[in-house]
Image (cartoon, grey):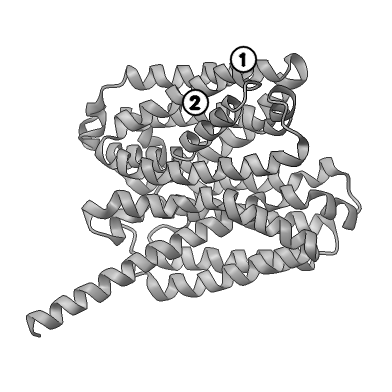
Amino acid sequence: MTEGTRTQTRQITERRDWLGVVAVMVGIFLLVTAEQLPIGLLSQVSTALNVSPGIAGLMITVPGVVAAFSAPLLPVAVGRLDRRWMLTSLMALMTVASLLGALADSFALLLATRVLVGVCIGGFWAIAGGLASRLVALPQVPRAMAIIFSGVAGASVLGVPAGTWLGEQTDWRIAFIAMAIGSGLVTLALWWLLPPLPASQPVRLSTLFGQFSNRGVRVGVYVTSLIVVGHFAAYTFISPILQQMAGVPLANVSTLLLLYGGAGLMGNFLAGTAAGRNPWRTVLVIPVVLAIATLSFPGLAGVSPLGTLLLMLWGAVFGSISVSMQTWILRAAPNAEAATALMAFVFNMSIGFGAMAGGQVVDGFGLSTVLYSSGALFVLAALIVLRTPATVLASPSGSR
């Protein structure tokens, strides 16, 4: 083989690997969209299947809880199964779950399909989070991770609004069918574009629990929990916060949330580069800025345009957490796949707990208190990072 032929072959392989990165990103985009899509279609589904809006809300709760537990347990269950097979199978299952959801004639059946969606979300995220280093050259890993995790922000910016619009213009079942079609196409793309990805070592429960012996992983878990709980405690109630504190008319809330999502998408890419250079400093900035935004919001939200700027800052910084914490974990963990699965569990459980705790605070003490409470959690997260030497990310095997 001539040098020119080898160069051309290498370029084709690299291009295929980058397309594989994009396919994984689209997979995450669809899964997160599927998880959150019922928020926009809640009224339609509750009316069509004759259940209360509160009961219909289980369509969000169930996949979140299932995803939290499937993230660490599914890699254990499949052992050494090639990760290309695993990701492809999960997207195929997502295709079936979306199609069955569209055909469901009872809420019980629809909820059963949401269990399958949760399995797909948790299992896919647990594996996809660590794929960048296996698909591209080491210097390109931060960029690849930013692309993969842009699927999370992209789902909020484009996926959920588009799915909601489609359901409003046609029927909620059509939105589910669109998810099935998209998932089917991604299934084919993953199988075609991803190279064989054998498990470097099987993930066992002992391996998962063993991650806590690593100080860098422990700090990553604590900081992620505090930030995600704090965020969702307040952000779950962002609509009444904007209306009552910033004086935003209800008709304009969706526009501001779209801008919020766009800021989050931008923050994801900026953080991908920054975290690749210095993950400790990048992770420290996140809770510090979130604390500034939430603690100052009650006093400044009504001052135009400071309220909007604070919301955009909030979105940009929180949009960076997935790629930043994943970079932290990959630097700290001796077993990247096990640590990623653990982080996926922590992230999803923190979402549910944050929303629930925020509701209790809002009902008992009001909207301002929930913002102050979230700010306090962000400050605590920042203090934990400050007390952690950056050297815990230098050598996973030695960072105890």
Residue type indicated by callout 1: Gly
In the picture, the quarter occupied by the C terminus is top left
In the picture, the quarter occupied by the N terminus is bottom left
Q: Is residue 91 above or below residue 329?
A: below
Dot 2 falls on a residue whose secondary structure is helix
Residue 33 location, x and y as percent?
61, 54
In terms of depth relative to the viewer, which is nearer, 180 or 164?
164
The residue shown at (77%, 53%) is 41
Q: Is residue 165 above or below residue 59?
A: below
In terms of depth relative to the viewer, which is nearer, 259 or 283?
259
Q: Is residue 15 above or below residue 129?
A: below
Residue type indicated by callout 2: Leu
Marks 2 and 1, how far apart at CA: 15 Å
Q: Which mark is residue 335?
A: none
Residue 244 location, x and y as percent?
74, 24
User: Which residue is label 1 attached to?
Assistant: 299
Q: Is residue 19 above or below residue 288?
A: below
User: Which residue is label 2 attached to?
Assistant: 290
Q: Is residue 131 left or right of residue 343?
A: left
Can residue 362 be seen in the rendering of this structure? yes
Crowd around label 2: few <14 · some 14–19 · many ≥20 (10 Å):
many
Q: How many marks?
A: 2
Q: Is residue 29 left or right of residue 129?
A: right
Can residue 207 be seen in the rendering of this structure? no
Q: Quadrant of residue 239?
A: top right
